[in-house]
Amino acid sequence: MERLELEPGAELAYGLGARRCAGAIRNGNHIPCDRERAPKCSRHERVFDESTLREREGEHAVYLAAFAPATFKVGITRLDRLETRLREQGADRGAHVFTVADGDIARDVEEDLGRDLAQRVRVATKLDGFGRDVDAGAWNELLAEHEPIETYDLDYGFALDAAPVPETMAAGTVVGVQGRVLLLDRDDTVYAVDMRDLVGYELREGETTRDRQASLGSF
């Protein structure tokens, strides 16, 4: 396996070949799978549920996350992973609202708050907010209801003049990464790639020649 650092300015030049089950990684080694179901077959599929892991032991944080312009959700994570978890989700802002003894209690609090707030936000919804600001009035109103312990204003190291174009590709100049979304500049257009959509593809050296939707700015 090869690990690539997706630093701004890095160049990717891969075409996408056939897609199938991505297999598994054990002890740093990739174990391939030839089953056609992508990105994971039933044998290799793993559903992440924090409440089922040993990670549920120890202090947990219940947090609020904001995605521009005005999508808000509640979530939980280990206390020592709070800012990391917000960044993993690509949140624009965050707030630590409760500290509880373990993950089971955190899950109960999340379910209670989840009656009024989302517990999941689709990537497409997040993309709609790229390049936009969080509605400060709506966010501050939500914070006033919960009296947060600490708040976070998250910066991902890039700015966008316009919304990126959703695409599945692995060629271009890295603009940055927000959550699981990779931003690539290619032909004067910024594309947004959900990296989960790349899982299972064979990578081919050299850029793809497939037609892509372009932004008006590229003309």
Image: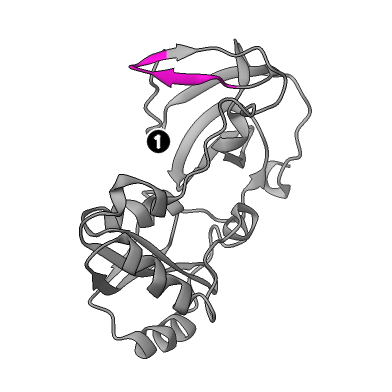
Q: Is residue 39 magenta?
A: no
The correct choice, above or below, for 23 with respect to 214 in the image is: above
Residue under label 1? 8
Label 1 neighbourhood size at 10 Å, few (<14), some (14-19), many (20+)?
some
Q: Position of residue 61 (x, y in %)?
A: 28, 65
Q: Quadrant of residue 40?
A: top right
Question: 186 or 102, which is in the foreground?
Answer: 102
Relative to residue 68, is residue 39 drawn left or right? right
The correct choice, above or below, for 154 with respect to 109 in the image is: above
Residue depicted at x 21% and y 61% = 59
Relative to residue 206, is residue 47 drawn left or right? left
Q: Secondary structure at mark 1?
A: loop
Which corner quadrant holds the N terminus? top left
Question: 45 or 137, which is in the foreground?
Answer: 45
Q: Is residue 24 magenta?
A: yes
Which corner quadrant holds the C terminus? top right
Q: Quadrant of residue 17?
A: top right
Question: 36 or 144, which is in the foreground?
Answer: 36
Q: Position of residue 18 (x, y in %)?
A: 71, 16
Q: Which residues are magenta?
A: 22-29
Q: Position of residue 30 (x, y in %)?
A: 45, 13
Question: 81 or 14, which is in the foreground?
Answer: 81
